[in-house]
């Protein structure tokens, strides 16, 4: 499950990062792409693709857990509007918050289900 999460989410994040750079600070369906946001998506996406194709399932599990924590925390910060400087810097809005929450919770589920599966195997 973690390998699938890492590969799929990683590929989507790479596409979003590249699309964001191609859009050069334009809005797309209510989402604004900033250089920082694009860089984060591209970096976490490349790590995800790498982890998804790595031989060890531990890499994918760790990626799912860490990205799950990171994206869930970003969503919580966005919903709480705190700290405002980070929300403004990342240009977070309610749609981003929902997307980050979904990606984060899926990562947590994939990472911790994978941990349970590896432990029982």
Image (cartoon, grey):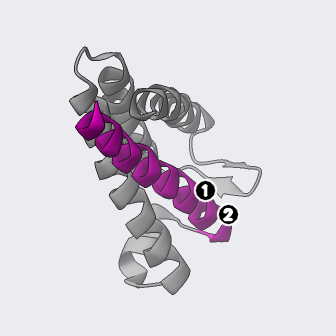
The reply to whether the magenta stretch includes residue 102 is yes
Q: Which residues are magenta?
A: 93-121
Image location of residue 57, percent across then percent down = 27, 26
In which quarter of the view is residue 3 placed? top left
Task: Name the residue: 65% across, 47% down.
Answer: 26
Image location of residue 86, percent across then percent down = 37, 72
Image location of residue 52, percent across then percent down = 37, 23
- Give the label on residue 99, or none: 1
Task: Name the residue: 49% across, 68% down.
Answer: 75
Task: Name the residue: 37% across, 83% down.
Answer: 83
Answer above or below: position of 80 versus 47. below
Secondary element at tag 2 = helix
The answer for how far apart the CA atoms under marks 2 and 1 are is: 6 Å
The reply to whether the magenta stretch includes residue 28 is no
Q: Main secondary structure of the magenta part?
A: helix
Q: Residues within 10 Å of mark 2 (few under 14, many from 20)?
A: some
């Amino acid at each position: 499950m973690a390998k699938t999460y890492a590969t799929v989410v990683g590929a989507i994040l790479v596409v979003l990062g590249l699309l964001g750079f191609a859009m050069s600070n334009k809005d797309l369906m209510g989402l604004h792409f900033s250089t920082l946001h694009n860089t984060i998506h591209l970096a976490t996406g490349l790590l995800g693709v790498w982890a998804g194709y790595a031989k060890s399932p531990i890499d994918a599990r760790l990626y799912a857990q860490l990205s799950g924590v990171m994206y869930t925390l970003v969503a919580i910060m966005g919903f709480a509007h705190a700290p405002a400087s980070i929300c403004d810097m990342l240009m977070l809005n309610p749609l981003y918050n929902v997307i980050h929450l979904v990606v984060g919770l899926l990562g947590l589920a994939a990472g911790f289900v994978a941990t349970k599966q590896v432990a029982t195997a």
